[in-house]
Amino acid sequence: MADIATIDTPAAALIPAETDQGTQRLHRAIMIGIAVVLVIAPFVAYPVFVMKVLCFALFALAFNLLLGYGGLLSFGHAAYFGMASYVCAYTAKNWGLTPELAILLGTAVSGMLGLVFGALAIRRQGIYFAMITLALAQMVFFFSLQTPRFTGGEDGIQAVPRGRLFGLIDLSDDRTLYWLVAAIFMAGVLAIYRIIHSPFGQVCKAIRDNEPRAISLGYRANQYKLAVFVLSAMLAGLAGSTKAIVFQLASLTDVYWTMSGEVVLMTLVGGLGTVFGPIVGAAVIVSMQNYLASLGSWVLVVQGVIFVICVMTFREGIVGVIAKWIKKPL
Amino acid sequence: MLTEAAPSPAKAATIAPMLKVRGLEAWYGESHVLHGIDFDVAPGEVVTLLGRNGAGKTTTLKSIMGVIGKRKGSVVLEGAETINLPSRAIARLGIGYVPEERGIYASLSVEENLMLPPRVRPGGLSLEQIFTLFPNIKERLKSQGTKLSGGEQQMLAIGRILRTGAHFLLLDEPTEGLAPVIIDQIGATIRRLKQDGYTIILVEQNFRFAATVADRHYVVEQGRVIDMIENDQLDANIGKLHGYLGV
C-alpha cells in the first residue's frame, strides 16, 4: 500500500486544496487587486505596453489551463493564437467587421482548429502529444507562409483598422481601446477561474493526476481532455485576436514555433498550475522583451538563462514559490 | 442505505451468480500473469481472494475492472459480458473499484474527492449516510485528500464509491498498513454493506480479517484459482490454508 508520503504528488498539489474559505477570500482579494491595477495601469504606464502584457497574459492563462489543469503539454499553441490573429485581422480589414465581431470570429476559428487538432493529438500522451501539437502548429505556419492572399505572407496583415466597438465607440485612441482589452482580459481570467473550480475542472485535475483511476471511476477521459483542449485553444484565440486589434497587425511571428515556446516560458516563470502565475510570468517576459529590446537578439539569450535559472532553482515559478511560502494556493 | 437482506451462503450458492469469471487471462506487457481464473460470486455475497504476494489477486480485480493492458477469457456481470468493454463502461455497470493505493487525488480536497465519481446508478448513499458510516470524513471535508491518515484515506476511497450507486465492490487490501482499531472499523463497514445487499470481492492477505467478513474464500496461486473454502469450513481447513499462504 502506498504510504501518504510516497504518493506521487504534483508540485501544484503540495499546497492545500482550494476549497477552504480563507483561500476563496484570498482569491477574491487578488481578483479585486487585479481589477484595481487594471484601472490604474493606463495612467502610470504606456497603454499599448499594458495591452501587450494583458494579451500575452491571457494567452499564458489559456496555455496554463491546458497544461496546469489538464496535464497536456502543447508545443503548438501558437497555431491558435496566430490563426485567430490572422482571422481577426483579415475580417476586420477586408470584410469590415467591427472589432468585437472580428475578435469573436477569430476566437471561434481557433476553437474549431483546436477541436480538429485536439481530436488528433489527445490520442497520444506525453512527448508524443507534444510533438503532434508542434507538428500541427508548424503546418499552420507553412499554410500561413504559403497563402499570402489570406495572410499577407511574410509581410503579414498590416494596418488592421481598430474600428468602432459595436459600430459606436471609436477605438483608435489607445486609452479607449485599453478598456476593451482590460475587460476581455478580466472576462478571460474569471472564465478560467470558473472552469478550474467547476466540477468539470475537478475531473480534469483528476485525469491529470491519475488518468487510469479517473477512467475506472466511469469518466471518458478523452472527452474531457478534448474539451479542455478546445477551451484552451479558444482562449488562446481570444488573446491572439485581441492582439491583432491592439497592434493592428497579424504576422508570421504569431504562428511561429517560438511563440509556442514563449508561452511555455511565461507559464513556467509565473508558476505552472497556479491560477495567477501566468499573469506574472507574462508580465515578466513581456517587460523583459520590451526593456531589453536594445540588446537585440541577446534578449533570447537572457530569456534562455532565465528559463534555466527557473528550472534549476524555483521550479514552481514565482507565484508557485509565494504560494508555498504562504501555504495557500494562488 | 439499501435495505434488501443479503442471502445466506447456502442460498447464495443456488442463486445465479452475479459475477461469473471463466478462463480469465491477463498480461503485463509480455508477462503472462493470470493463466485462467475461474470463480463465481453470488448476489449479496462477500468473497475473498486469498494468496501469496504475486499470486494474481490484484491483477484479477484489475482485469475484472478492465484496467489492465491485455486480458482475455470471460467476465460476465449480471448476464452481460464485459471482457471487451472499456473500463469506464464497466464502471457504469455498477462496479466500484477501490484500488490498493486508494487512488485519492492529491490536488483535490476530501469533499472534492468524495463528489468526484459520477453517479452510475440510482441508490447511491447520500453524503449523510456516508458520514454516518465514516464520521472522520465529515470532520476532514476541507482537508487535502492526501493529508488524511491511511485509515481515513481508505474510508474516503470506499465512501466515494458508495456515493456512485455501485452495488458490486472490488476492495483491494483495504486493511493493509492500518491500525487494528481502523481494521475493525473497516470490517464493521464491510459487514454493514453486506447486510445492506452489496456484493463484494475482497483481496486480502490477512485471512484472519477475511474470516470475519467473508462467505467464501478463493485461493489464488500462480494466476489460477486452486481452491475454494467456505467460511464456515475455515477452521477445518486451516492447515491447508496455511500451506497455501505459506504462513
Image (tube, rainbow, N blue to C red):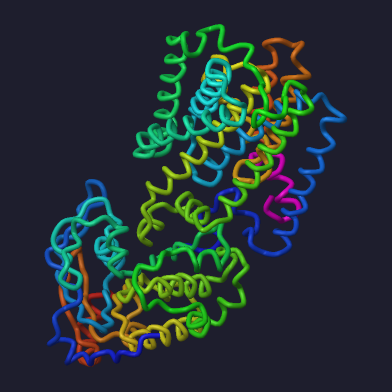
**Which image quadrant for residue B226?**
bottom left
The residue range painted magenta reads A314-330
Residue at position x 43%, y 33% in the image: A112
Specify whether B11 is left or right of A102: left
* Nearer to us in this view, A278 or B98: A278
Residue A80, given in percent of the width and then of the height, sits at 50, 28
- A181, above or below A4, in the image: above
**Which image quadrant for residue B219?**
bottom left
Residue at position x 58%, y 27% in the image: A240
Residue at position x 52%, y 38% in the image: A232
Residue B162, given in percent of the width and then of the height, sits at 41, 75
Residue B154, given in percent of the width and then of the height, sits at 47, 72
> Which quadrant, please, contains the N terminus of chain A?
bottom left
* Nearer to us in this view, A222 or B29: A222
Specify whether B193 is left or right of B238: right
- B42, above or below A22, in the image: below
Residue B64 shows up from this direction? yes
Does the magenta run of residues contain A267?
no
- B177, above or below A127, in the image: below
Specify whether B209 is left or right of A183: left
Residue A258 shows up from this direction? no
- B12, above or below B63, in the image: below
The residue furthest front is A168
* Nearer to us in this view, B148 or B120: B120
Residue B37, given in percent of the width and then of the height, sits at 16, 66
